[in-house]
Amino acid sequence: MDATDFRVGLLGATGAVGQTFIRLLADHPWFTITEVAASERSAGQTYREAVNWLSGSAIPEHVADLEVKPTEPDALDCDFVFSGLSSSVAGEIEKSFAEAGFPVISNAKNYRLQDDVPLLLPEVNPDHTALIDQQEWGSDGFVVTNPNCSTVGLVCGLRPLMDAFTVEAVQVTMLQALSGAGYPGVPSLDAVGNVVPHIGGEEDKMATEPQKILGTLDGDTVEWVDLPVSAQCNRVSVRDGHLACTSVRFEEDVTPADVEQVLRNFQSPLADEPLPSRPDPFIQVLDAPDAPQPQRHVDAGGGMTVSAGRIQECAVNDVKFVLLSHNTVRGAAGGAVLNAELLARNERLTPAPVDAVGSPA
Ligand code: NAP
């Protein structure tokens, strides 16, 4: 075992996001899934028996034969946990793991807005990891969250613009993929040939989360940025990929050419970090007049690159453009894996010593 060999537990392992974690971690150079946990319905079965596996690729062998454990800290032997738990149960369960000393890298919404919990997007606010030092769970445990899947693409596009200019207001119309609703998700008769102009809680999350994510670390707190975001969220009949039709008002005179140049030239703070899931590029700007499209561009950078295009003058605000991000990779499991890689790189995560745990599984 060396400093990057971690034994990973997966909470909510049988869910849609849990399955994406398993797929993304199948050949991960640092992280090996050694524990899978889910509800009482699944506990005690092998993972293969418990899961309704949705991917076209096979379940990785070393995971398929693991016994699904109850979601209790005493039941798991690992260095940290990823949580793909449903938000109806994530609050209490993640708390119990943090209190028991586990780092919890979560996808759920429960702790996102808590003052001492980083709402982390490594290319956007890596310094917010400092909030971990403020957490008091009575142990070395901590919680780090990632943003809502619809917020992710938007803030990736806004970070470069906010570094270069003063952004006064944002209007965004979201066209969101069906996979964002989990499985089985939206009933087929609502989804096929239809658009549902309501996704519960999503517009509020898009108005709130960017203010924290794009906020400034000041000592031991994050000063939220005062940024009005007016979002309209629609569920569309697309499998993967959230499209954000975005219009931005600036304090300065900013042209579409300025926006394009800033998006093309943005230097991610991770550019020199050897993190296995770091996409290169972080943002790709596409020239074709009909790009980006979910079907053609959602898998760029293994689903971690955000695509931008259609950069034009806006008759209402100043500049409008389209952003595309993969909702279950960049917007969920892949984002959480990158969060964990950054934390490992910064020695916020540490593998247990070999003599304390024996050989890694
Ligand atoms: P899901 O398919 O419903 O999976 C939920 C998981 O939680 C399952 O493994 C389930 O286990 C487990 N679970 C439910 N009740 C439990 C309990 N009482 N104790 C222990 N485990 C329990 O949900 P999902 O779509 O994967 O979403 C998971 C989380 O990620 C949610 O908080 C969601 O908001 C967030 N998220 C989802 C997306 C997305 O694109 N889908 C994007 C960003 C964030 P059983 O199979 O045993 O019931």
Image (cartoon, grey):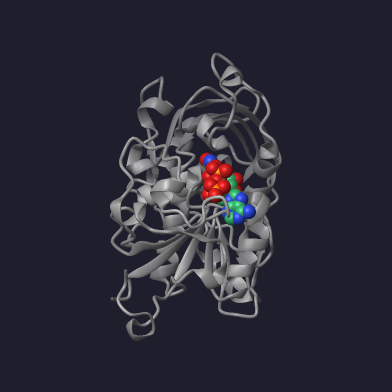
Horizontal and vertical percent for residue 349? 44, 72
211, 38: nearer the viewer: 38
Horizontal and vertical percent for residue 329? 43, 44
124, 335: nearer the viewer: 335
Residue 105 visible, this orientation? yes
Residue drawn at (51%, 45%), measured in percent from left and top? 15
321, 131: nearer the viewer: 131
The quarter holding residue 182 reads top right
In the image, 47: left or right of 37? left
Total labels drawn: 0
Residue 278 visible, this orientation? no
In the image, 258: left or right of 31? right
Residue drawn at (33%, 82%), measured in percent from left and top? 354
Is 134 rendered above or below residue 259? Answer: below
In the image, 265: left or right of 316? left
Residue drawn at (62%, 22%), measured in percent from left and top? 315
Split into 4 quadrants, where in the image is the C terminus? bottom left
Split into 4 quadrants, where in the image is the N terminus? bottom left
354, 326: nearer the viewer: 354
The quarter holding residue 236 reads top right
Horizontal and vertical percent for residue 263? 43, 41
